[in-house]
Amino acid sequence: MTVAPWPIAELHVHIEGTLETELLVTLARRNNVPLPSYNPDELRELYRFTDLQSFLDIYYANLAVLRTEDDFYDLAMAYLVRAAGAGVRRAEIFFDPQTHLANGIPLSVVFGGLTRALRDARRDLGISADLILCFLRHLGGAAALETLDAAVPFLDQFIGVGLDSAEVGFPPSLFTEVFARAGALGLHRVAHAGEEGGPDYVQEALDLLGAERIDHGIRAIEDPRLVQVLRDRRIPLTVCPFSNVSLRATPTLAEHPLPALIEAGLLVTISSDDPAYFGGYVDDNLTGIEREFGLDPHQMATLARNSFLAAFVPEAEKRRYIAAVDEHLEGLLRLISGA
Ligand code: HPA
Ligand code: ZN
């Protein structure tokens, strides 16, 4: 029996991390960019990571294949089609402009392709999607400021800023100024924190960056006082279980702190992070944790509702999405009871 996936908002996905090896090969051939292999399965075999950096090295190298507006369009559209099939009704999608700028690609090309894909997906797939511009923390605060300045002409094409890449050694405090400027521009603010870095990075992201959501945030569980702050302020954590296992932030899925985070009353959402690299999209992550932790339909519905509560959309839109979750739950319960 196949059951439709839960209606969900995907709040933590890097568009560059959705580059499947098949498309990687297509784009490499299209743009004459060398790859270690032109066999998608062989390329996927290389995805054996020991930590965040070992992943980032391959991930950034692969992005050399993205050259034209159509390349960015094809990348985003492939994700959006797959996401629509995964039950995603709303996607808030990270992108890393500094990587593309370093490859000689102007921002107008990146925005041109991504924005056109998002617009077509809204029309043709009924999926609502927006972009969040991420700063690469390993390049530091001054480079982030330069990037934000360069993106100001495209302010109508992204809804917020984020912070990603190598975490340890690059604390949120380096980015105080750029996040303040983003806030003054009316942009939403999120940050990766507590993936490999400790709970102090999560606290800094809240206090110094004004982060409205924390991406990953799993190490927050190590600090009971921080957990209380996150609970009291209803700060969402966008948790990516398959990513955490792939990058060894947790030894196994069974040992993932997700149940403890839920038990602590935190507003947890589930996302895929970099699905082309970590073995699954958001629906796969959801079924993975459902099975691993024996979550019941009511607990799954809470995770789905949380995703919409944490989304950057108007209240009326949240209510419509949440009604769809409730309807899905009722259908599931009817199916289970055989009614
Ligand atoms: N962490 C930090 N940076 C990233 C990630 C991640 O999981 N994915 C893509 N960039
Ligand atoms: Zn991420």
Image: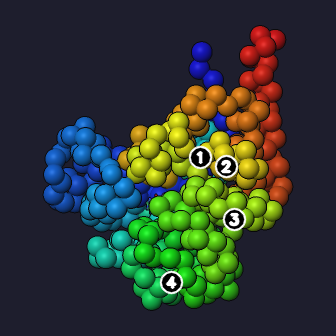
Question: Do tag 1 and tag 2 residues touch (Cβ < 8 Å)?
Answer: yes
Q: Which residue is mark 2?
A: 261
Task: Mark yes or no: residue 59 visible.
Answer: no
Q: Is residue 127 above or below residue 73?
A: above
Distance between the alpha carbons at the discs numbered 4 and 3:
21 Å
**Residue 264 position in % (x across, y down):** 74, 50
Q: Which residue is mark 1?
A: 257
Front in this rendered view, residue 305 or 254: 254
Taking the view exactly as shown, the residue that stands out farthest to the top is 338
Question: What's under tag 3, amino acid-wise?
Answer: Leu
**Residue 337 position in % (x across, y down):** 79, 13
Q: Which residue is mark 3?
A: 226
Question: Do tag 1 and tag 3 residues touch (Cβ < 8 Å)?
Answer: no
> Residue placed at 25% from the left, 37% from the top?
41
Q: Residues within 10 Å of mark 1 (few under 14, many from 20)?
A: some
**Residue 336 position in % (x across, y down):** 74, 16
> Residue placed at 83% from the left, 49% from the top?
319
> Residue placed at 58% from the left, 51% from the top?
239
Q: Which residue is mark 4?
A: 174
Question: What's under tag 4, amino acid-wise?
Answer: Leu
Task: Mark yes or no: residue 35 visible.
Answer: yes
Question: What's under tag 2, amino acid-wise?
Answer: Leu
> Residue placed at 56% from the left, 71% from the top?
201
Q: Residues within 10 Å of mark 2 (few under 14, many from 20)?
A: many
Is the residue marked 2 within 8 Å of ligand 2, measured from its CB?
A: no
* Lower position in the chain sequence, tag 4 or tag 3: 4
Question: Which image quarter holds the N terminus?
Answer: top right
- Element carrying mark 2: helix
**Residue 331 position in % (x across, y down):** 77, 24
Distance between the alpha carbons at the discs numbered 1 and 3:
15 Å
* Horizontal relation, residue 88 to residue 279: left or right: right
Question: Which image quarter holds the C terminus?
Answer: top right
